Image (cartoon, rainbow, N blue to C red):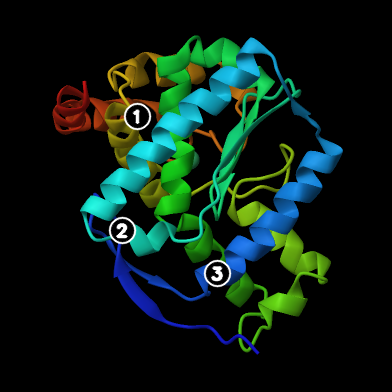
Amino acid sequence: MVMLVSACSRVPITKRKQVNLLPESELMSMSLTSYRDFLKSNPPVNNTAEATMVKNVGQKISTAVSHYMNQNGQGKRIQGYAWEFNLVNSPEANAWCMSGGKVVVYKGLLPLTLDEAGLAIVMGHEVAHAVARHGNERMSQQLIAAGIGIGLDLGTAQQNPQVRNILLSSYGVGSTLGVLAYSRTHETEADKMGLIFAAMAGYDPQVAVAFWQRMSSKGGAKPPELLSTHPSDQTRIKNLRDFMPTALKYYKKGS
Ligand SMILES: [Zn+2]
């Protein structure tokens, strides 16, 4: 039986102290199953210029992330990651990354990202959620809230539809309803880390400001993961601008 394990660590880049209650290895395995299921019902687009762009940008970001983590003694955090970047044919402007590096980009996002650099901003942000283990934190909280946190055997818990839904919700996967928005802390953290990941991968982080402005002007049709109520659009853009000088250091180094 897998018990809640209390593992203290620090999030890369922001150095925030975090306590992960669930074994990340179990979340990777559950995420893999959910990812396969998701792609069965939402077949990935293959061999188009757009699908290739998603894979290329993802590849560059994951290479930069691995390099950074190994250089900074945090390689263990992404141990066992088997990155995948798939584009799905959905009109929603959405994207997410599950534990283990399983990424989905929805076609409806591409008119808003405009180009490779814009896409790198979103993918950097989503990859950051996974690397920072936000899903782990969210899932622990939700399991505890649902009264099923203690002594949970995650291996068999996958049979439980409630646990499966909590997993999906924790990683921002799903349709417009019933998906929890990431907290303000998680969003701001993913924004900062994402800027650096995009910059390290060779993309100009400054395009993030215009991207979030485009998202913001999209108004009510915002998708769950990229929901901008946490933080508010204005706060987010101010935070991005404040953090830009730091992110640019990584861009100059990498280019
Ligand atoms: Zn997010």
Question: Does residue 137 lie above or below 40 as drawn?
Answer: below
Answer left or right for 248 relative to 240.
Answer: left
Three-letter code for the amino acid on which mark 2 is drawn: Val
Three-letter code for the amino acid on which mark 3 is drawn: Ser
Residue indicated by mark 1: 198
Three-letter code for the amino acid on which mark 1 is drawn: Ala
Q: CA distance from mark 2 to mark 3?
A: 17 Å
Q: Nearer the viewer, residue 26 or 161?
A: 26
How far across and how far down the image is residue 250, in percent? 19, 31
**In the picture, which quadrant includes the N terminus?**
bottom right
Q: Quadrant for residue 149, please give it.
A: bottom right
Residue indicated by mark 3: 25
Crowd rating for badge 3 (residues with CA inside 10 Å; few <14, some 14–19, many 20+)? some
How far across and how far down the image is residue 125, in percent? 43, 37
Label 2 or label 3, whichever comes before in sequence order: 2
Label 2–label 3 contact, CB within 8 A: no
Q: Which secondary structure lies at badge 2?
A: loop
Farthest residue in the right direction? 41
Q: Nearer the viewer, residue 41 or 235?
A: 41
**In the picture, which quadrant includes the C terminus?**
top left
Answer left or right for 32 relative to 237.
Answer: right
Label 3 or label 1, whichever comes before in sequence order: 3
Label 2 or label 1, whichever comes before in sequence order: 2
How far across and how far down the image is residue 196, in percent? 28, 35
Q: Which secondary structure lies at badge 3?
A: helix
Label 2–label 1 contact, CB within 8 A: no
Q: CA distance from mark 2 to mark 1?
A: 17 Å
